[in-house]
Image (cartoon, rainbow, N blue to C red):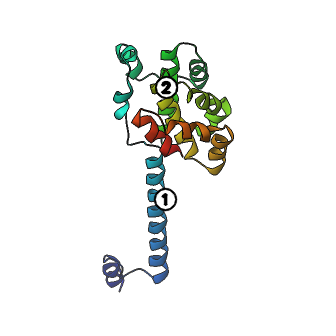
Amino acid sequence: MSQVADRRTAFKNAGKTTDEMRRKRCEVNVELRKAHKDDQLFKRRNIDNVEDSEEDLDTSAEASARGSCMSPIKMSVPEMIEGMKSDNPQIRMIATRSARKMLSKERHPPIDELIQAGVVPICVALLDDEANPNTQFEAAWALTNIASGTSDQTLTVIRADAIPKFMQLLKSPHLNLAEQATWAL
């Protein structure tokens, strides 16, 4: 009789109880919902949007230094903060891009770590840097990624008065910047 029982379990659902099948269906549904939620979160963070249309925002001064600013630079969080506060616009842009990449490339981005380090108010201040639209774009993207986290993380961006600045960016002559502001809102 054990051969019959073994043969029965070899088929799809013949050897399983209804409880086993129900439990398995529930597990599969939970996994599908989690995968869908992660996909939506990654879309909000623009993860698929790698270095895409930033080309349109380049100014001639930044285009000459493009090699250094496009190369992957791994910065620590304190180095990023220091760079984002720099008087040198090129260093500011590189540090802001590094923060944005950290927030958008990693599977579990260190949003809370960057919030604790003070990235949010710096990025909000960089939204006013009209002389450097690339820096504005990177700051807006970083803030978008932070706001796409938990409700507390979103509230941090709101409390930093980013909303009025995003509203101003909607009027930007740089379409990618206006689009990024739309994503953030």
Q: Which of marks 1 and 2 is nearer the N terminus?
A: 1
Q: Decide which of 2, 67 is in the foreground and name it.
A: 67
Percent of width and height locating residue 17: 45, 82
Percent of width and height locating residue 175: 40, 36
* The N terminus - image quarter: bottom left
The residue at the point 54 percent across, 24 percent down is 129
The residue at the point 62 percent across, 46 percent down is 154
The residue at the point 61 percent across, 22 percent down is 78
Percent of width and height locating residue 56: 35, 29
166 with respect to 51 (left or right): right
Q: Residue furthest bottom?
A: 1
Q: Decide which of 140, 94 is in the foreground and name it.
A: 140
When the figure is inspected, residue 71 is found, relative to residue 178, above or below; the finding is: above
SS for callout 1: helix
Percent of width and height locating residue 136: 50, 29
Question: Is residue 163 visible in this depiction of the protein?
Answer: yes
When the figure is inspected, residue 88 is found, relative to residue 81, above or below; the finding is: above
Question: Pointer 1: what residue?
Answer: 34
The residue at the point 45 percent across, 26 percent down is 134
When the figure is inspected, residue 141 is found, relative to residue 10, above or below; the finding is: above
Q: Label 2 sits on what residue type?
A: Thr
Question: Is residue 98 visible in this depiction of the protein?
Answer: no
Q: Label 1 sits on what residue type?
A: Lys
153 with respect to 7 (left or right): right
What number of labels is visible? 2
Label 1–label 2 contact, CB within 8 A: no
Closer to viewer: mark 1 or mark 2:
2
> Marks 1 and 2, how far apart in space?
34 Å
Question: Pointer 2: what residue?
Answer: 135
